[in-house]
Every structure is written in structure tokens, then in C-alpha cells.
Image (cartoon, grey):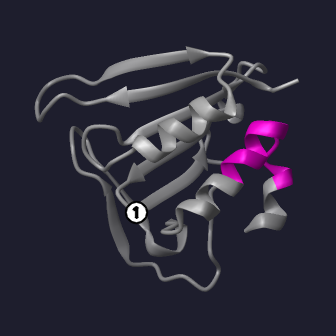
């Protein structure tokens, strides 16, 4: 049984315009992968996977696109980190409020991004991701 209750994507229609939330209930892996591959750093910069547990700690947040992504949970308790990476800031989201991440917290390989997200999609568990980092 898939632990993901719903997938949220935010679409921005232009600078100064509010984002529009798009929700998919009980998403398939095809839905999730399609949302990740569609991400860019302006119009589609945010994808959230919400587990059926219902708390913020279970929300897997993906920010970025266009070849750069940050992966973290909404509560801030977990975040992807490459221990060999740098502390330099990288802008991952250019519309609305924007978002920057440290280089060490940014992935540039879409296949690695998808592998990590796929593991969370299957388990709903951040502990399972530790061996993948």
C-alpha cells in the first residue's frame, strides 16, 4: 500500500500573481515522476508528497527544477545533504518569494532525485533515505 495520500504542485502564472495549488489524491508513481520532471525554477517550483499520517513531519518537499532540486521535509527535521558539498547559496526558485539552498543541499542529477523520492514514495519514511545520501 502506497503511504502517499496526496501530491500537491504549485503553479505560478507570473510575477506578482498568486500560486495555484494542484492536488492529486492517491498519486501513482507516474504522477509523482511526471510532476518532478515538469518542475522548473519559475512556473512549477514546488512539489509536496503528503503521507496519510497527516502531520507536517511527513510532508516531503521538493523545490527547484531546471536541473537543481532541494529535498527536505516540511518541519525542517530532514534535508538532503552531500557532506562533500559547499555552503555557497544556489537560487532554486525565482518566482514569488523564491528559495535558495546551500550547494551541499542541492541535487543536480534527476535520476538521483527520482531514486530518493521513489524510496520515500514506497515507504513514507525518512530513515529509509539515510543510506541513499
Magenta segment's dominant SS is helix
Question: In which quadrant is the N terminus drawn?
Answer: top right
Counting labels gives 1
- Relative to 89, say whether 9 is above or below: above
Task: Label 1, secondary structure: give it.
Answer: loop
Q: In this view, which residue lies farthest toward the front?
A: 30
Q: Is residue 83 located in the magenta-colored stretch of the structure? A: no
User: Which residue is found at the position 58% from the left and 41% from the top?
Assistant: 33
Q: Magenta segment, which residues?
A: 116-128
Provide residue 105's location: percent of width, then percent of height.
Answer: 53, 67
Q: Is residue 18 left or right of residue 73?
A: left
Closer-to-camera residue (102/40):
40
Residue indicated by mark 1: 67
Note whether residue 78 is visible.
Answer: no
Closer-to-camera residue (40/85):
40
Q: Is residue 124 located in the magenta-colored stretch of the structure? A: yes
User: Which residue is found at the position 45% from the left and 69% from the top?
Assistant: 102
Q: In this view, which residue lies farthest toward the top?
A: 25
Neighbours of disc 1 within 10 Å: few (<14), some (14-19), many (20+):
some
Note whether residue 128 is visible.
Answer: yes
Provide residue 128's location: percent of width, then percent of height.
Answer: 85, 52
Amino acid at each position: 500500500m502506497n503511504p502517499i495520500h496526496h501530491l500537491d504542485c504549485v503553479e505560478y502564472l507570473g510575477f506578482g500573481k498568486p500560486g495555484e495549488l494542484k492536488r492529486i489524491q492517491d498519486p501513482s508513481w507516474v504522477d509523482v515522476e511526471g510532476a518532478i520532471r515538469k518542475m522548473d525554477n519559475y512556473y512549477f517550483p514546488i512539489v509536496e508528497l503528503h503521507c496519510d499520517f497527516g502531520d507536517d513531519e511527513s510532508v516531503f518537499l521538493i523545490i527547484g527544477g531546471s536541473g537543481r532540486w532541494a529535498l527536505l521535509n516540511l518541519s525542517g527535521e530532514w534535508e538532503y545533504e552531500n557532506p562533500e558539498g559547499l555552503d555557497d547559496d544556489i537560487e532554486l526558485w525565482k518566482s514569488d518569494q523564491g528559495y535558495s539552498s546551500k550547494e551541499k543541499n542541492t541535487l543536480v542529477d534527476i535520476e538521483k532525485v527520482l531514486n530518493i523520492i521513489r524510496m520515500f514514495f514506497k515507504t513514507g519514511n525518512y530513515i529509509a533515505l539515510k543510506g541513499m545520501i
